[in-house]
Image: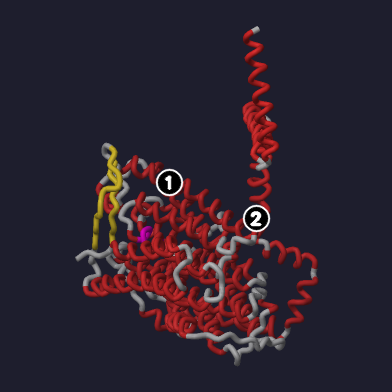
Amino acid sequence: MNIIFFIILFPLMSFLSLSFSQGKISKKNVKNIGICSILISFLISIFYTIQFIHNPSYLVVQKLWTWMSINELNIDIGFMLDGLSLSMLDVVTCIGLLIHIFSIWYMKSREGYSRFFAYTNLFIASMLTLVLADNFLFMYLGWEGVSVCSYLLISFYYSKEYNVQCAFKAFIITRISDIFLMIAFFLIYQKYGTLNFQDIYFLSNILNIDNIFHLNIINILLLIGVIGKSAQLPLQTWLTDAMVGPTPVSALIHAATMVTVGIYLISRIHFLFLFTPEVLYCISFIGILTILLSSLSAIVQTDIKRILAYSTMSQIGYMFLALGIQAWSAAIIHLIMHAIFKALLFLSAGSLILESQNEKNIFKMSISRKKSLFLYFNFLVGGASLISFPLLTSGFYSKGNILFSVLQSGHLNFFFIALFCSFLTSIYTFRMIFVIFHRNNIQNITLSKGLSHNFPLFFLLIGSTFIGSFIFPPLCFVFPSVITNNYGKLEFEIMSSMISILGVFVSYYLWVENPIIIYKINKIKIIKKIFYFLYNGWGFNWFYNIFFKKLYLYVSKILSFDFITISINSFIYIITIINRFLLKTVNGYIRDYILFFVFSIIVIFMFILFFIN
């Protein structure tokens, strides 16, 4: 029996039941409904994973009904499950489930408990729709659903105007890229006559590509369409502002859902990008620029969540770099590993923030290692995996495969920049850990933590070690087979390991042993200006504010004085005056009603006399 649709159905039903209950059910029932729906989806994913283990070439296609049929255009509500969608499915349901369990502890004393689980269940349902859809248009339904949910969750604490502004920013920036994505869908249908992934794959293999120019346009539009969601240069500015939402939301966006959809989409239609090597080079180029920008910016950040946000931007950049050199499997494997250790870091950060009374500045939230030994160990393992600490962490194997693939591809410029950014990653990651846990002004505040807090973190902790490297997604029948050459890999691993460890020592020396050096460096005016420039994300927000936001407002102001607008506004003004006058006739005073009644009779008689004469 084919039960793929249940994977989406249960989170969607959970969202509807929690939404229509309007907060009238108890927190215990809210928790049970929200968690059980994701658990059922996860168990179904495990069921299909077992089938793929026995048969890696397994392919499941399920058509529910025809969504629309206009002449030759037929769009189905259908699902396709292969090795790629299964890999994403396991990430979304497993990491999503752990984040939901952690949220029981995190949200227990906060307002909007039912609303939170309703939004997150819809978030998961939208992401699962995106991953399982068998055509572009149905996938786009999940794509936009993820955007709406991100807006709702980023602005979860909507009583603060700044939070709503950040949510609007994320929504609008991702809408810009989505316009290009939709145009690409139109062009794909024009070229192939279908939006179904399998049909496009089949047609791309049998049709002669006589006009590469059109395919280049399509792939460029697709690339622009994904960089917004995946927070790549130059549409990356929304990601750090999205940190105003609850920390489990940050973990959900960064680890399991939103930022990974660009990697998935490019991987899903990799067969189109193979025809356009120039666009593939652009993917790598955008990835390497994003890695460099985010790594340099993260070094000067003081907010723990913004540091982790920049690290996410950087790691997604590594995945883009891998896609550009056709290391498809390496990109997906690193996506899985990154989801595990980044969820660990974000959830641990959320626990630290609560323990520090909602303080996010790493220089103001020093924590006792002895009092919070479990969280300290989580940060050590998660941070070590982020910097690809040798042998012991999963990140060492996944990120190392990407870097070695870049080296083998012959793009030495990309390789050395990526290696340098790995050094920067080690510095800013362990700068965060050393500043929080290795300073003298220690806070001894501790919070009671139960199973809902410790279980997800422990599971993610295990996955962030070398044990996670034993996860082998069934991708061999999805992407074209590549002959690997491991010549020189040992030397590369030794070199990259030394760079990562060197970054840890540099970080310890500058922020623990001799912090006076950083203090003196910050006093140099030119360095101070550079740090300010990096702190503000290379001035992208300033640029967009001047050349887009203010320009738009200026043009809107000019257009507001045209004849049509003035006429409409004048009519509205007259209606408003009449409305105010009429409202005074229903003030509740009987004397005024009698006065208006007598006045109306007099007016009527005057009209009668006038017309008679």
| Dot 1 crowding, Cα within 10 Å, few <14, some 14–19, many 20+ | some
What secondary structure is marked by label 1? helix
Q: Hey, what amino acid is under mark 1?
A: Met
| Residue at 59 percent of width and 80 percent of height | 352
Q: Earlier in the sequence, mark 2 or mark 1?
A: 1
Q: Which mark is residue 541?
A: 2
In what quadrant of the picture does the C terminus appear? top right
| Residue at 65 percent of width and 78 percent of height | 357
Magenta span contains residue 549: no
Q: Is residue 463 visible?
A: yes
Q: Position of residue 184 (x, y in %)?
A: 41, 45
413 and 305: which one is in front? 305
In what quadrant of the picture does the N terminus appear? bottom left
Q: How many marks?
A: 2
For marks 2 and 1, give the CA distance.
Answer: 26 Å
Q: Position of residue 425 (x, y in %)?
A: 57, 73
| Residue at 23 percent of width and 72 percent of height | 51
Residue to which mark 1 is pinned: 182
Q: Hey, what amino acid is under mark 2?
A: Asn
The boundaries of the magenta stretch are: 127-131
| Dot 2 crowding, Cα within 10 Å, few <14, some 14–19, many 20+ | few
**Identity of the residue furthest to the left in this view:** 1
